[in-house]
Image: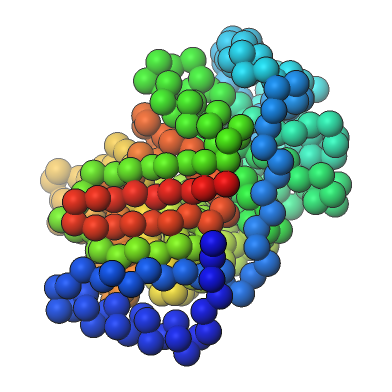
Amino acid sequence: MTLNISNKKWNIIKFLSALMLALGLSSSVEHSTTNNHRLPIQPPLLKRGDKVAIVAPAFWSPDAENIVTQATKKLRSWGLEAVLGQHLYKKDGRFAGTDAQRTGDLQWAFDDPTIKAIFTLRGGYGTTRIVDKLDFTQFLKHPKWVIGFSDITTLLIQLHQLDIVSVHGEVLKNFLKPQYTSSIASLKTLLFEGTAQLTASPSQLNRVGIVTAPVVGGNLTLLYNNLETPSALDTNKKILVIEEVDEHLYALDRVMVQLKRTGKLQHLAGLVIGGMVAMKDEPSNPFGKSVKEIIKEHVAPYGYPVAFNFPIGHEAPNLAFPHGGIGKLRVEKDTVSLVFEP
C-alpha cells in the first residue's frame, strides 16, 4: 500500500533522514509517496490465449526474420499468439522502415483492442522520431503492456505521462541469447503474475534508506534527450532508474550535470543505478573519476537512498520491472532490493 504524506510531514521525514545519514546512521524510516498523481493504471495481466503484437519502432536488424521466428516460438510456449506488424521487415536506412511505416505499425498495435501486449524488436534509435505522431486515444480505452528498453525508454516515459504502467524489459533481439534466460524469465513472471524482485550486490558508495514510490527511468541518454519535450520525465518523488552503454565518462558527467540543473535529481524518492556498460575514457587524458564517483558527486547534496549495481540495462541479466509501478527500494549495508507486488 502506498500512503499519501503531507508536504509538511514529508519535509520533516526528509530532514530527519538527512540528519541520520549525516551522522552515519542507517535510517529505519520508510518513505512512501504517490507524488499527488493518480495511481498508475496497470494493464491486465496476460493469460494463455492472449494475442500480442511484434513491432519495430527503432533500428532495423539484418536478422530480423530469424529473431521474430525464434521469439514467436518462445511466446507460443507461453500460450500467446503473436501477430506481426505489417512493416516489421521493412528497411529505410538504419531504421526498420520509414517513420510513417513504423508509426503505422505501432498505432495499429495501440488501437487493436484484441492486442494485450506489444513486444519490440530492438532499440538503437528511432522512437523519438515518431512518438509525437502517435494517438493514444484508443490505447487509453484498452491499456496494454508495452515492453522494451534502451531507445524504447522514450515510449515508456511517454506512457508514464498518461499514468500507464509499462515494462522496462528485454527486446526480442536478445530472446535468442542464452545469457538472457533469467531476463526473459523475469519478463514472463511480470507479465503473467505481476511481480518483480530485483536484488543488487552492496556497494560502499550506496546511500542507505527504505522508500516506496513509483519507479521510472531507463537509458540515461534518452532521459536527457527528452528533456524539455512533451515526453520529459517527471521525477518528483519517484525512484529513478538510470543505465547507460558505450559513453565517455565526460559525457556521463555532462548528462548528470544537466539533470541536476533541470531539477530532475533534486526531489527524487530514490536512485537506482543499473549497468554502466562499456563506458569509455581517454587514457592519454583521463577524466579522473569513475562512473560511480561521477554519479555520487552529483547526488551528494540530497538525502534519498542510492543503490548501484542493479541488473538492469545493456548486459545480462537485464531483469524486467514495471515502469511507473509502485516499488519498494530497500538499501541497507548488506541487503539491496527493489520489489514490486501485484
Residues 250 and 204: in front is 204
Where does residue 3 sit, x and y in percent of width and height? 54, 71
Residue found at x 27% / y 79%: 18
The foreground one among 155 and 45 is 45
Find residue 174 and report its horizontal and vertical position in percent: 48, 23
| 342 vs 39, nearest the viewer | 342
Picture residue at 48% right of the left edge, 41% below the top: 196
User: How has the structure been colored for display?
Assistant: rainbow
In which image quadrant can residue 126 be found? Answer: top right
**Whether residue 155 is situated above or below residue 113 in the rendered picture:** below
Could you say where residue 296 lies in the image, as x and y percent from the top left? Answer: 25, 63
Q: To which quarter of the image does residue 231 belong?
A: bottom right
Q: Is residue 320 above or below residue 158?
A: above
Reply above or below: 329 against 196.
Answer: below
Horizontally, residue 100 falls left or right of residue 337, namely right
Q: Quadrant of the N terminus?
A: bottom right
Q: Quick check: 178 left or right of 26?
A: right
The answer to whether residue 38 is above or below residue 116 is below
Q: Residue at x 37, y 60 (%)?
A: 271
The picture quadrant where one finds residue 277 is top left
Q: Tell me which residue sits at (41%, 26%) in the image.
A: 182
Q: Residue furthest bottom?
A: 8
* Number of numbered discs visible in the structure rendering: 0
User: In this orientation, which residue lies closer to the viewer: 111 or 196?
Assistant: 196
Residue 281 percent coordinates (x, y)? 22, 45
Can residue 149 be seen here? The reply is: no
Q: Is residue 145 among the parts visible in the rendering?
A: yes
